[in-house]
Amino acid sequence: MAAIATLAHRVRIALAETNLANEQSEIDLQNKPSWYTDIYPLGKVPTIKYGDTLLAESSIIVEFIAELAQETSNILPKDLVQRAQARIFIVFFGKFSGLLWALVKNQDDEKVNDQLVKQSPTGPYFLGEAFSITDIAAAPFVARLNISLEVGIIRGNIKIPTGEGYERYHQWAKSITSRKSVKETLPMATELVTAYNRIRNQSSQE
């Protein structure tokens, strides 16, 4: 996995929550080692190997990990309706390209808050008191957005709206980003800044 990668962060959180035994290999996204592409030609990150099987796509991996740890972890809702609702929000969250970036630009900025209120008015997590695969799917993005705003990676005088209509979003965002499993697997802000600047410089040279 790659420490700076948002999608790989999802898997790290799930592993931290479930305490499943695992071995992790750090992958340089800009220069993937040959051994990695040899065993997985598509080169997607993250990828996990379980027995002789390779699995990719972060949301699938997270749910797979949650299934493995059902007896010791509650990140996968046992209630089938809640499980379906969790999956729907994950799709919703990923469907809107740059949803959180739109949030800071005041575009469709009430969508996330409205979905959270609809699911659980009191919170603090998506399903209420239980931290779940839904929160895991979103936490890496929210955490990186917060860091980007704090250190000025996002240029211009923009910020996440506050006040009436955004209370549930801020409660949720604070709850998921302050979760131990999220904080302990989040790269240092300096690492993220370096990575973002490198990507930005490479893009400008293309």
Image (cartoon, rainbow, N blue to C red):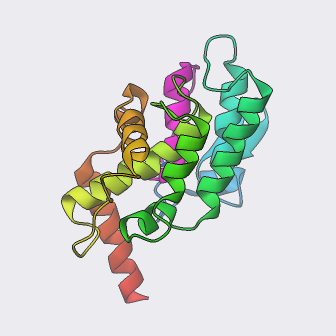
Q: Is residue 34 above or below residue 176?
A: below
Q: Is residue 188 above or below residue 124?
A: below
* Residue drawn where x is 41% and y is 81% of the image: 203
Left or right: where does residue 142 sit relative to residue 54?
Answer: left
Q: Position of residue 169 (x, y in %)?
A: 42, 46
In the depicted view, which residue is nearer to us: 157 or 41? Answer: 157
Q: Is residue 144 above or below residue 73?
A: below
Q: Quadrant of residue 11?
A: top right
For the C terminus, the quadrant is bottom left
* Residue drawn where x is 68% and y is 53% of the image: 91
Q: Which residues are magenta?
A: 3-26
Identify the residue at the far top of this view.
Answer: 71
Left or right: where does residue 72 sit relative to residue 202?
Answer: right
Q: Tell me, yes or no, whether the highlighted magenta stretch contains residue 20.
A: yes
* Residue drawn where x is 62% and y is 19% of the image: 74
Q: Position of residue 106 (x, y in %)?
A: 40, 69
